[in-house]
Image (spheres, grey):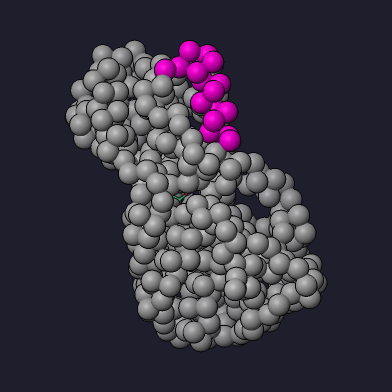
């Protein structure tokens, strides 16, 4: 009695003409928890046409009217919180508490997005500000929608990172083609059931599920798509950027966020943030702390505290509310093992961890990591934290910047001037002073540089990225 989920096309739930489905296997139960449709290219075309058609009318109705649908969606998500959280837990192995929080965060995100959009105004400009310009020329600069937005979120926030693309797209008058991560598709479909219940006009949002090999490139290269918002791995994002046409892209990709611990840091506090930053949801967050760069004078003490803190982490099933849960698939766990083995072969020390049961990797601390080891540079997306000892703040900055990634960094010090000096030198989107790396609160700009992405998210930035400026010039008599 495994449920088969339909895809959402032009306001209707449908089975694909392909007659094929994809099994969604729970990462910790290892059973098939549902099947999603493997749709065809023709069905992608239908979805894009439906979106193009619906978008015109949607952009014409008032902002207040669009707001009503989104507020209803947020209310509906809260009403369905338990049902959706249960699916998130089973599908991506996130603890029930975190899954419930994800749903609430999503409803809050949608509401704030509406409120932000309601308070965004255009501007007017006078012609005579420029030499030779006329006083009788006045420009009205407004933001208009781009058309059809392709939203591709990752598995780790199958509801929140999907809505973080859909809500700004919709409130600003766009239609959406939503391609959920395959592992995460059922959660995404549930989220769209809430939007359907909220009465969203037909065709405005279409959910396309299917094999990346069949519809992935086809979607990205589709002429009917006017903007792509993608969150996922750096390799996929780089390929996507090569294939997409001349359309705006926002890419939120991988990271290798350093936690820089200066010799004057409050080590207990720093350790608390580092552990939470590195190991929440088994480190399956783009913003996880993925390396510690600690001053050698305090390294032993920090390592001891980190070890104690790691031992307090609960390990096991998301159904028991554990922090360290089985990884999304065995390939992910294999990769962590490869990184650990490489580091150990080159002289790193296991402080704790390095134990595996199926997809479950115990939280692992590696000390004496150096720049010859893959784990110093590559993103594990799992619960392994390398510790690199440095002899100065400058060395920490240099190692931080040598990375191909540039998402966030944490700096732990009691000296605010030092904190700023280090923050100014680090090539990342955001620097957290005395706190863990994280995306939220969701109205802050969220930016990845270098291999971590392009463009900006965060509620206002996302709205801006899904609209363009349009100028109407009045030539007065
Ligand atoms: O995985 C990427 C997410 O944007 C991280 O979000 O910092 O709230 O966990 P988070």
- The image quarter containing residue 160 is bottom left
Q: Is residue 364 left or right of residue 344?
A: left
Residue 326 in sight:
yes
| Residue 337, placed above or below residue 132 | above
Residue 85 on the magenta span: no
Residue 345 on the magenta span: yes
Q: Depth check: 223 or 159 in front?
A: 159
In the orientation shown, which residue stands out farthest toward the front?
Answer: 1
| Residue 102, placed above or below residue 355 | below
| Residue 345, placed above or below residue 382 | above
- Quadrant of the drawing holding the N terminus: bottom right
Q: Residue at x 48, y 60 (%)?
A: 90
Q: Residue at x 43, y 42 (%)?
A: 283
Q: Residue at x 60, y 78 (%)?
A: 204
Residue 262 in sight:
no
Q: Position of residue 109 (x, y in %)?
A: 39, 66
Q: Position of residue 231 (x, y in %)?
A: 55, 52
Q: Depth check: 220 or 465 in front?
A: 220
Q: Is residue 213 left or right of residue 358?
A: right
**Count of marks overlaid on the render:** 0
- Quadrant of the drawing holding the C terminus: bottom right
Q: Position of residue 250 (x, y in %)?
A: 57, 53
Magenta part of the protein: which range? 334-349
Q: Is residue 274 left or right of residue 188?
A: left
Q: Residue at x 45, y 17 (%)?
A: 348
Q: Is residue 235 left or right of residue 382?
A: right
């Amino acid at each position: 009695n495994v449920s088969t989920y339909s895809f959402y096309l032009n306001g209707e739930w449908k089975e694909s003409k392909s007659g094929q489905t994809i099994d969604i296997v729970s990462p910790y139960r290892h059973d098939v928890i549902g099947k999603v449709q493997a749709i065809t290219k023709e069905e992608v075309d239908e979805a894009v046409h439906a979106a193009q058609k619906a978008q015109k009318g949607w952009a014409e109705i008032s902002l207040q009217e669009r707001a009503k649908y989104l507020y209803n969606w947020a209310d509906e998500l809260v009403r369905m919180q338990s049902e959706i959280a249960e699916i998130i837990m089973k599908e991506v192995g996130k603890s029930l508490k975190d899954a419930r929080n994800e749903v609430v965060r999503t409803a809050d995100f949608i509401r704030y997005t509406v409120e932000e959009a309601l308070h965004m105004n255009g501007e007017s400009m006078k012609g005579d500000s420029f030499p030779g310009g006329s006083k009788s020329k006045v420009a009205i600069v407004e933001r208009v929608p781009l058309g059809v937005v392709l939203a591709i979120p990752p598995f780790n926030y199958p509801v929140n990172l999907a809505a973080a693309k859909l809500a700004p797209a919709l409130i600003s008058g766009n239609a959406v083609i939503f391609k959920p991560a395959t592992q995460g598709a059922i959660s995404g479909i549930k989220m769209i059931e809430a939007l359907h219940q909220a009465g969203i006009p037909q065709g405005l949002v279409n959910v396309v599920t299917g094999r990346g090999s069949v519809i992935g490139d086809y979607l990205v290269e589709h002429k009917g798509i006017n903007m792509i918002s993608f969150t996922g791995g750096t390799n996929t994002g780089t390929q996507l950027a090569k294939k997409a046409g001349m359309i705006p892209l926002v890419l939120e990709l991988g990271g290798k966020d350093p936690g820089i611990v200066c010799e004057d840091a409050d080590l207990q506090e720093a350790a608390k943030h580092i552990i939470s930053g590195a190991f929440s949801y088994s480190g399956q967050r783009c913003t996880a702390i993925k390396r510690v760069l600690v001053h050698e004078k305090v390294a032993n003490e920090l390592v001891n505290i980190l070890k104690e803190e790691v031992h307090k982490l609960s390990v096991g099933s998301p159904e028991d509310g554990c922090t360290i849960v089985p990884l999304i698939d065995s390939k992910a766990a294999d990769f962590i093992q490869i990184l650990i083995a490489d580091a150990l072969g080159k002289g790193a020390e296991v402080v704790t961890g390095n134990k595996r049961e199926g997809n479950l990797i115990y939280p692992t601390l590696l000390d004496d990591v150096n720049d010859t080891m893959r784990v110093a540079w590559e993103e594990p997306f799992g619960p392994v934290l390398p510790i690199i000892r440095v002899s100065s703040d400058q060395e920490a900055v240099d190692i931080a910047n040598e990375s191909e990634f540039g998402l966030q960094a944490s700096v732990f010090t009691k000296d605010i001037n030092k904190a700023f000096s280090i923050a100014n030198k680090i090539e990342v989107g955001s620097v957290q002073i005395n706190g863990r790396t994280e995306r939220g609160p969701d109205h802050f700009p969220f930016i990845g540089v270098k291999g971590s992405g392009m463009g900006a998210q965060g509620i206002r930035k996302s709205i801006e990225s899904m609209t363009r400026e349009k100028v109407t010039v009045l030539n007065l008599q």
